[in-house]
Image: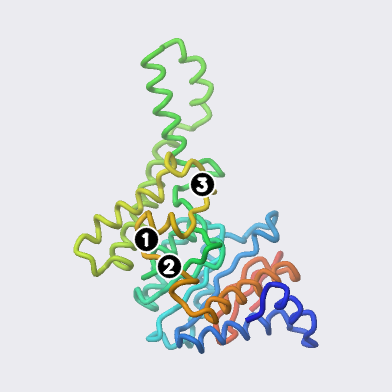
Amino acid sequence: MPSWSQVLDEIKSSKRIDALDFVRRKYLKLLFEKEGRNVIAYYSGWLQKPEIGNADINDDDKNGLMATIHGLDRKRGLDLILHTPGGDTTATESIVYYLRKMFGTNIRAFIPQIAMSAGTMIACACKEIVMGKQSNIGPIDPQFRGIPAQGVLEEFNRALKEIQDNPKTIPIWQKVVEKYHPTFLGECQNAIDLSMEMVSSWLATGMFKDKNNAKEIANRIAKKLSDHERTKTHSRHIHIDEATKIGLLIKSLEKDFKQEFQDLVLTIHHSYMHTFSNSSAIKIIENHLGNAVVYNNLDRQR
């Protein structure tokens, strides 16, 4: 299978006006032929275009999934290739609900590089996650405009403790705490609870549904993934060894699949990276039949 540079050479040497699309779809079809499972790539171009909005997970993505799932033989299950910075939690909840209505829990998440935050949550709703040495997921602790909800609660609790220990610190902490509006602490706790409940439920009913202690396993994993004190930052990269240690059911792209299959998954990833670098696309949802919804800078094309 072609490497990063070879994929780029293939695109450049093609005489087709749709070379970017043609190359991506060619390899998606090959992946389907290898396993006989439906393939959908759910890709964001935020790395290439960090200043562009709408690259994260949102409710509009369901339209892309509806378009790409239509006409598929759902009995074949789904291999979902994820590359995303994350996004809206409630949109993610609705997307997972829809995916499970279509495929049940017969969904595998492939993460060639990055699936952060809400992307990690989607992966946790699948029966297994496939990662390579270069892959990572991320913490699922919710954020408010870049502020970690759990970090806010930790800061507030620290303020209470220090004020109790030394009332002279009240003026210092007053300046810190007054930036939060009255209901903000409650919103933070609700967001944390929702995120953990969603992931725990999906793990218990999917990845660990055959385990007698599924709820216990799921709760433990969800707690670790949402523990801001443990991960320190929402952008923390959790690689395959740590993801396995946390307790997730992870398959190794290098060890559990043949070399040709591994190379094919990475070739597909390269083809999407080149598309984002050489077009106006900011997000692509696409299946192995070539059906796609492509979100551009200013509009969406199907």
Q: Of discs 1 and 3, which sits in the foreground? A: 1
Residue 182's spot in the image, x, y percent?
44, 32
Q: Amino acid at mark 3?
A: His
Q: Amino acid at mark 2?
A: Ile
* Residue beneath disc 2: 129
Badge 1 element = loop
Specify the quadrant that holds the N terminus.
bottom right
Q: Nearer the viewer, residue 248 or 158?
A: 248
* Residue beneath disc 1: 248
Residue under the image location 21 percent in, 60 percent down: 213
Q: Amino acid at mark 1?
A: Leu
Q: Which mark is residue 208?
A: none
Residue 256's spot in the image, x, y percent?
43, 74
Measured in 3D between alpha carbons, the distance from the residue under mark 3 to the one under mark 2, in whole angstroms, is 20 Å
How many C-alpha atoms fall within 10 Å of the one at disc 2: few (<14), some, or many (≥20)? Answer: many
Residue 294's spot in the image, x, y percent?
64, 73
Measured in 3D between alpha carbons, the distance from the residue under mark 1 to the one under mark 2, in whole angstroms, is 8 Å
Q: In terms of sequence position, does the residue under pointer 1 or pointer 3 come before the other?
A: 3
Badge 2 element = strand
Q: Is residue 37 above or below residue 212?
A: below
Residue under the image location 56 percent in, 62 percent down: 134
Measured in 3D between alpha carbons, the distance from the residue under mark 1 to the one under mark 3, in whole angstroms, is 19 Å
* 207 with respect to 152 (left or right): left
Residue under the image location 65 percent in, 64 percent down: 45
Q: Of discs 3 and 2, which sits in the foreground? A: 2
Q: Nearer the viewer, residue 112 or 272?
A: 112
